[in-house]
Image: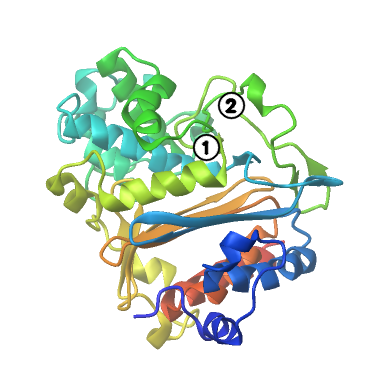
Amino acid sequence: MKFGMTAAVAALALSGCTAMDEPVEAQTVANPQRLALDETAPAMLAQNNVPSLAVGWIEDGEVAWTAVYGERAPGEPADDNTLYNIASLTKPLVAETILRLVAAGTLDLDTPLATHFVDRDLTDEPRAQKIKLRHALSHRTGIPDNWRERMEGGKLRLDWEPGTQAKYSGENYVMAARYAMTATDTRLDRLAQQALFAPVGMSDTFFTPDPSWEGRVAMVRGEDGSLRLPDNSPQGNAADNVHTTIGDYTRFVAAAMRGDGLTPELVEARGTIYDDQTQQVCPPGLIPPDKCAKANGFGLGWIILDTGINRFHLHSGKDWGERTVALFEPDKRLGIVVFTSGANGRQVIADVLKLLVDDVPLTTLTQAEADFEKRGR
């Protein structure tokens, strides 16, 4: 298995090239994946009109390196201190916080949320009494759309029995977080700080705006070409809008990969596919059968993608001008995080993965997602 050693990377490694802007001590132990990215990242950004790119690489369960390219703002380079709105990569942070609380005995995956919390729109819905944390973290509550604003009357509803079918929704994570906060009488950001951020060493990750953001947030470019600061959530959001650095999030992914703070039973539960959705992401005619994943569906906090080569835990994010992805292979102890600050960032992500990860079903899927976004414009 050659996760992270594609033909392009291998060729560069054999050439003995080094990155000229690296310190001398770093050049002596230069990572071939990092060198390949140094060579190609500027062109990726220019070709796709994306202001910046940040990448974190994990080997043997530890952060091997991080790299940042492009500009945070016009005329100002992005760097390791640049904060990115990571969009839906917020959800794995919340899931891992909750799973650590379960491991500590504070919460339980299979206790109905209604013991502490029922959404105001579902107080007269009998099926809401059956929703559990396990359902919410695997998108199996019965909620049929991403946000209640998209539903009739702007009200949340359930369209099927909890635990029987998966449908991605930010409301699932809002619901899970509200339960955790009510059960512990603690705000979400404080729960995350206590259970996850402090133990992992994440000092630059925020659910809400902070004075330390001044001059650090990566500006984002929308589909119309305009440039602005990304959205944020003044009250915090369990599904979106966390701001963090590439270093912090890569440390988080490495810790999640190792199963830090979790029991073996929870690690297994997290990596279980609860509703296989391979046909939805690989329908006939879209991707050749020999390039489709063997299995794909929601685990707890992560999508589980079994390509037949690797079994990835992965998640992506998409907002107005943000495109992000994180994935790891726990058995091989390898992972990658990619943040971009432009609406064309999905193509940059596809290019980065094709360069660094030798897994055809994965890279075929990410390219198909990039192509789908382009066709929709």
Report the amino acid beneath label 1. Asp
Q: Quadrant of the C terminus?
A: bottom right
Q: Earlier in the sequence, mark 1 or mark 2?
A: 2
Residue 55 showing in the rendered view: no
User: Residue 291 appears in which quarter of the rendering?
Assistant: bottom left
Dot 1 falls on a residue whose secondary structure is: loop
- Residues at circles 1 and 2 in contact by the CB criterion of under 8 Å: yes
Report the amino acid beneath label 2. Ser
Q: Is residue 309 above or below residue 347?
A: below
Distance (Cα) linking label 1 and label 2? 8 Å
Across and down, in percent, residue 104 comes to 17, 29
Across and down, in percent, residue 10 comes to 52, 84
In the picture, measured across the screen, residue 3 lies left or right of residue 223, that is: left
**Which residue is denoted by mark 1 in the rendering?**
240
Alpha-carbon neighbours of circle 1 within 10 Å: few (<14), some, or many (≥20)?
many
Is residue 48 or residue 368 the one in the foreground?
A: 48
Residue extending farthest to the right is 75
Point 34% across, 69% down: residue = 278
Q: Quadrant of the N terminus?
A: bottom left
Across and down, in percent, residue 76 comes to 81, 44
Is residue 42 or residue 227 the one in the foreground?
A: 42
Alpha-carbon neighbours of circle 2 within 10 Å: few (<14), some, or many (≥20)?
some
Residue 288 showing in the rendered view: yes
Point 31% across, 28% down: residue = 195
User: Residue 13 appears in which quarter of the rendering?
Assistant: bottom right
Dot 2 falls on a residue whose secondary structure is: loop
Point 32% across, 78% down: residue = 309
In the picture, measured across the screen, residue 191 lies left or right of residue 357, that is: left
**Which residue is denoted by mark 2 in the rendering?**
233
Point 64% across, 48% down: residue = 322
